[in-house]
Image (cartoon, grey):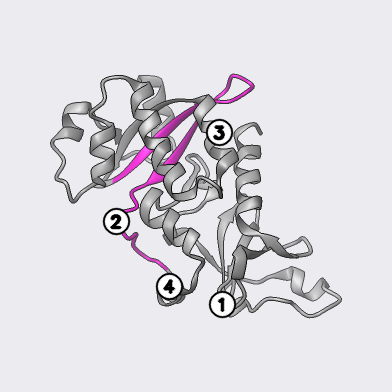
Amino acid sequence: MVQKLTYLKKYNENVRILTMDEIGKLDDNVIPIEWKKLFNHDDIKGRIDLLLKIWAKNVGIELRNTIAYLNEHLTNIEIMDVEGEYSILYTIKNTKGDLLYYEGRNPQKRQKNIEIELEESWDKTPFSIQRFYENVHDGFYYYASTSMGLVPLDSVTYLGDEDIEWSIIDDLEEPIKINLDSSFGFFSNGMGSYIAIDYTNCDDNNATFWSAKLKPKYNINFWSYVDEWIVIGFDT
């Protein structure tokens, strides 16, 4: 535990892991009631099973490979507290034997500093994305980099942000096929590439691979790419 906390504090010095007693004393409106129920289990396997059932209920088809990987390689789950904001810490032992820490934020709490454009267009995003963020987690990502996963809502990239310069645009030989002013990058690989949704053209989870340096890929399936990239991140 000491070694884990030392690692976690490298990225946020205010983080702490709650004891079971502390979790039990949290008010019902602070964390999802499902979280309190699963942490009532004395055995880790029981907690993990209940947590993955929440995933399966909401995105069992969309993130089936991610769920299958977690079912095999997830070794522990705990609740983290960062100045009153709660998340589930996932400890994953990947196929190489390395321990990875992933964070899933509290879906019950709307995060601060969300782009006003995202707030106003939230009901236009695919229902499956809304379902994940509202019922599973407000983002699920590699703890150290807040990437290689679905980023928290306050870190979603608004492609139409005037402060962002997309150098790739000058190199494209044909017009952009999405509207940047209605597009948001919900998945980030941490190196300037995103899987983005244009809410004016997102039927059947239609998405775009968007990058600052690489040619965009249009008409990809949002969840297929997200599911594949998350699993790739586990073993990278």
The boundaries of the magenta stretch are: 86-114
Comparing 26 with 4, the one in front is 26
Mark 2 residue element: loop
Q: Local crowd at mark 1 within 10 Å, few (<14), some, or many (≥20)? A: some
Q: Which residue is mark 3?
A: 68
- Front residue of 15/222: it is 222
Indicate the amino acid at tag 4.
Asp
Instruction: Name the residue: 53% across, 25% down.
Output: 73
State whether residue 199 is above or below residue 54.
Answer: below
Classify residue 18 as left or right of residue 174.
left
The residue mark sitting in front, 3 or 1, is 3
Q: Which residue position holds label 4?
A: 123
Q: CA distance from mark 1 to mark 4?
A: 13 Å
State how far apart marks 2 and 4 are (Cα).
Answer: 17 Å
Q: What is the tally of numbered marks visible in this picture? A: 4
* Amino acid type, residue under disc 2 in the picture: Lys
Tell which circle, 3 or 1, labels the residue nearer the N-terminal end.
Answer: 3
Residue 19 placed where, x, y %? 23, 27
Q: Is residue 46 above or below residue 159?
A: above
How far across and down, in percent of the image, does residue 121 sit? 45, 76
First of labels 1, 4 by sequence position = 4
Q: Is residue 46 above or below residue 32?
A: above
Task: Give me the residue at 50% from left, 62% from top.
Answer: 156
Query: Amino acid type of disc 3?
Result: Ala
What is the CA distance from the residue labelled 3 to the residue labelled 1? 33 Å
**What whole-number distance in Å separates the C-alpha atoms at marks 3 and 2?**
27 Å
Q: Earlier in the sequence, mark 2 or mark 4?
A: 2
Residue on which the image places disc 1: 182
- Tell me, yes or no, whether the highlighted magenta stretch contains residue 220: no
**Residue denoted by label 2:** 109
Task: Evaluate whether residue 46 shows in this view.
Answer: yes
